[in-house]
Amino acid sequence: MEWYYAKNNRQEGPVSGATLKSMIVSGEIASTDLVWREGMAEWRPAAEINDFESAGVVEPAGIVAPPGGSQIPQALPPGVPGGQIPPAAPPNNSSAIVSMVCGIVGLSAPCLCGLPVIASIVAIIMGHVARGEIRKAEGMQGGDGMALAGLILGYVGIGLFVGGIAFTLLMEVS
Protein backbone atom coordinates (compact mmCIF):
# COMPACT_ATOMS: atom_id res chain seq x y z
CA MET A 1 0.00 0.00 0.00
CA GLU A 2 1.22 3.49 -0.84
CA TRP A 3 0.84 6.25 1.74
CA TYR A 4 1.02 10.02 1.42
CA TYR A 5 1.83 12.37 4.29
CA ALA A 6 1.69 16.13 4.88
CA LYS A 7 4.94 17.71 6.08
CA ASN A 8 5.86 21.44 6.07
CA ASN A 9 2.62 22.31 4.26
CA ARG A 10 3.42 19.94 1.38
CA GLN A 11 2.06 16.57 0.42
CA GLU A 12 4.85 14.01 0.27
CA GLY A 13 4.95 10.40 -0.90
CA PRO A 14 4.08 7.85 -1.92
CA VAL A 15 5.92 5.67 0.60
CA SER A 16 5.26 2.12 1.77
CA GLY A 17 3.48 1.45 5.05
CA ALA A 18 6.69 0.09 6.56
CA THR A 19 8.62 3.20 5.51
CA LEU A 20 5.92 5.50 6.90
CA LYS A 21 5.88 3.62 10.19
CA SER A 22 9.69 3.87 10.53
CA MET A 23 9.52 7.61 9.73
CA ILE A 24 7.00 8.04 12.56
CA VAL A 25 9.08 5.98 15.00
CA SER A 26 12.22 7.98 14.13
CA GLY A 27 10.38 11.28 14.64
CA GLU A 28 10.74 12.39 11.02
CA ILE A 29 6.93 12.43 10.87
CA ALA A 30 5.12 13.68 13.98
CA SER A 31 2.09 11.85 15.33
CA THR A 32 0.04 14.95 14.50
CA ASP A 33 1.21 15.03 10.85
CA LEU A 34 -1.56 13.96 8.50
CA VAL A 35 -1.49 10.78 6.44
CA TRP A 36 -3.70 9.37 3.69
CA ARG A 37 -3.93 6.44 1.29
CA GLU A 38 -6.42 5.21 -1.24
CA GLY A 39 -9.50 3.85 0.46
CA MET A 40 -9.54 6.44 3.27
CA ALA A 41 -12.35 9.01 3.32
CA GLU A 42 -10.08 11.81 4.53
CA TRP A 43 -6.63 12.64 5.85
CA ARG A 44 -5.96 11.80 9.50
CA PRO A 45 -3.20 12.36 12.07
CA ALA A 46 -0.67 9.52 11.99
CA ALA A 47 -1.46 8.70 15.63
CA GLU A 48 -4.99 7.61 14.63
CA ILE A 49 -3.71 4.89 12.29
CA ASN A 50 -2.99 1.53 13.96
CA ASP A 51 -1.87 -0.54 10.99
CA PHE A 52 0.13 0.94 8.11
CA GLU A 53 0.54 -2.33 6.24
CA SER A 54 -2.86 -4.08 6.02
CA ALA A 55 -5.12 -3.62 3.00
CA GLY A 56 -8.20 -2.65 5.02
CA VAL A 57 -8.73 0.82 6.47
CA VAL A 58 -11.04 1.05 9.44
CA GLU A 59 -12.81 4.40 9.69
CA PRO A 60 -13.24 5.50 13.34
CA ALA A 61 -16.66 6.63 14.58
CA GLY A 62 -15.44 10.05 15.79
CA ILE A 63 -12.57 11.89 14.13
CA VAL A 64 -10.60 14.30 16.28
CA ALA A 65 -9.08 17.32 14.53
CA PRO A 66 -5.30 17.72 14.83
CA PRO A 67 -4.13 20.12 17.56
CA GLY A 68 -4.38 23.74 16.44
CA GLY A 69 -6.14 22.72 13.24
CA SER A 70 -3.19 24.10 11.28
CA GLN A 71 -3.37 21.64 8.41
CA ILE A 72 -6.45 21.40 6.22
CA PRO A 73 -5.97 18.39 3.95
CA GLN A 74 -9.53 18.53 2.61
CA ALA A 75 -8.39 21.41 0.40
CA LEU A 76 -6.38 18.80 -1.54
CA PRO A 77 -8.26 16.06 -3.37
CA PRO A 78 -7.23 12.70 -1.91
CA GLY A 79 -4.87 10.72 -4.08
CA VAL A 80 -3.29 13.64 -5.94
CA PRO A 81 0.43 13.14 -5.36
CA GLY A 82 2.75 16.14 -5.21
CA GLY A 83 -0.01 18.65 -4.54
CA GLN A 84 0.46 21.54 -2.18
CA ILE A 85 -1.42 21.85 1.10
CA PRO A 86 -2.17 25.53 1.67
CA PRO A 87 -0.69 27.14 4.79
CA ALA A 88 -2.99 28.00 7.67
CA ALA A 89 -2.56 31.73 7.05
CA PRO A 90 -0.79 33.59 4.28
CA PRO A 91 2.55 35.17 5.17
CA ASN A 92 2.53 38.84 6.07
CA ASN A 93 3.70 41.36 3.51
CA SER A 94 7.09 42.74 4.55
CA SER A 95 6.17 46.29 3.49
CA ALA A 96 3.19 46.11 5.87
CA ILE A 97 5.49 45.17 8.74
CA VAL A 98 7.87 48.04 7.90
CA SER A 99 4.94 50.45 7.72
CA MET A 100 3.61 49.49 11.13
CA VAL A 101 7.05 49.56 12.81
CA CYS A 102 7.86 52.97 11.30
CA GLY A 103 4.44 54.28 12.35
CA ILE A 104 5.13 53.23 15.94
CA VAL A 105 8.62 54.73 15.85
CA GLY A 106 7.17 57.94 14.39
CA LEU A 107 4.96 58.38 17.44
CA SER A 108 7.19 57.09 20.19
CA ALA A 109 10.75 58.10 19.31
CA PRO A 110 12.16 61.16 21.03
CA CYS A 111 12.79 64.08 18.74
CA LEU A 112 16.25 63.06 17.52
CA CYS A 113 17.33 64.69 14.27
CA GLY A 114 13.88 64.44 12.68
CA LEU A 115 13.64 60.65 13.11
CA PRO A 116 9.93 60.70 14.00
CA VAL A 117 9.06 62.71 10.88
CA ILE A 118 11.15 60.47 8.61
CA ALA A 119 9.69 57.34 10.21
CA SER A 120 6.15 58.69 9.76
CA ILE A 121 6.79 59.46 6.09
CA VAL A 122 8.23 55.98 5.53
CA ALA A 123 5.20 54.48 7.33
CA ILE A 124 2.83 56.29 4.98
CA ILE A 125 4.71 55.34 1.82
CA MET A 126 5.24 51.70 2.80
CA GLY A 127 1.63 51.40 4.00
CA HIS A 128 0.32 52.41 0.58
CA VAL A 129 2.84 50.14 -1.17
CA ALA A 130 1.90 47.20 1.07
CA ARG A 131 -1.83 47.60 0.56
CA GLY A 132 -1.32 47.64 -3.20
CA GLU A 133 0.88 44.52 -3.07
CA ILE A 134 -1.59 42.70 -0.82
CA ARG A 135 -4.48 43.50 -3.19
CA LYS A 136 -2.49 42.24 -6.19
CA ALA A 137 -1.53 39.03 -4.35
CA GLU A 138 -5.22 37.99 -4.23
CA GLY A 139 -5.18 36.32 -0.82
CA MET A 140 -1.64 34.94 -0.96
CA GLN A 141 -0.29 37.67 1.38
CA GLY A 142 -1.56 38.92 4.71
CA GLY A 143 -0.87 42.03 6.73
CA ASP A 144 -3.48 44.45 5.45
CA GLY A 145 -4.33 45.39 9.03
CA MET A 146 -0.67 46.12 9.80
CA ALA A 147 -0.40 48.27 6.66
CA LEU A 148 -3.52 50.20 7.66
CA ALA A 149 -2.17 50.67 11.20
CA GLY A 150 1.11 51.96 9.76
CA LEU A 151 -0.77 54.41 7.54
CA ILE A 152 -2.87 55.73 10.40
CA LEU A 153 0.11 56.06 12.74
CA GLY A 154 2.15 57.73 10.00
CA TYR A 155 -0.55 60.31 9.28
CA VAL A 156 -1.04 60.94 13.02
CA GLY A 157 2.73 61.39 13.44
CA ILE A 158 2.86 63.93 10.60
CA GLY A 159 -0.19 65.69 12.04
CA LEU A 160 1.43 65.95 15.46
CA PHE A 161 4.64 67.27 13.90
CA VAL A 162 2.80 69.93 11.88
CA GLY A 163 0.66 70.79 14.91
CA GLY A 164 3.78 71.11 17.06
CA ILE A 165 5.40 73.49 14.59
CA ALA A 166 2.22 75.57 14.34
CA PHE A 167 1.95 75.72 18.14
CA THR A 168 5.60 76.77 18.47
CA LEU A 169 5.16 79.51 15.86
CA LEU A 170 2.02 80.82 17.56
CA MET A 171 3.76 80.91 20.93
CA GLU A 172 6.66 82.90 19.47
CA VAL A 173 4.37 85.42 17.80
CA SER A 174 2.40 86.14 20.96
Image (cartoon, rainbow, N blue to C red):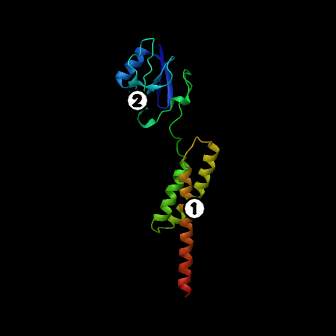
Q: In the image, 55: left or right of 149?
A: left
Q: Nearer the viewer, mark 2 or mark 1?
A: 2
Residue sitting at the far left? 25
- Label 1: how many Cα within 10 Å (few below 14, some 14–19, many 20+): many
Q: Which residue is mark 1?
A: 121
Q: Which residue is mark 2?
A: 32
Q: Nearer the viewer, residue 12 or 49?
A: 49
Q: Residue at x 42, y 30 (%)?
A: 64
> Whole-Å distance between the Cαs marked 2 and 1?
46 Å
SS of the residue under disc 2? loop
What amino acid is found at the position of numbered circle 2 in the picture? Thr
Q: Quadrant of residue 150?
A: bottom right
Q: Quadrant of residue 16?
A: top left
Above or below residue 153? Residue 89 is above
Residue sitting at the far top? 55
User: Residue 116 location in percent, x, y?
Assistant: 51, 65
- Which of marks 1 and 2 precedes in the sequence? 2
**Total numbered labels placed on residues in the image:** 2
Above or below residue 123? Residue 42 is above
Q: In the image, 152: left or right of 59?
A: right
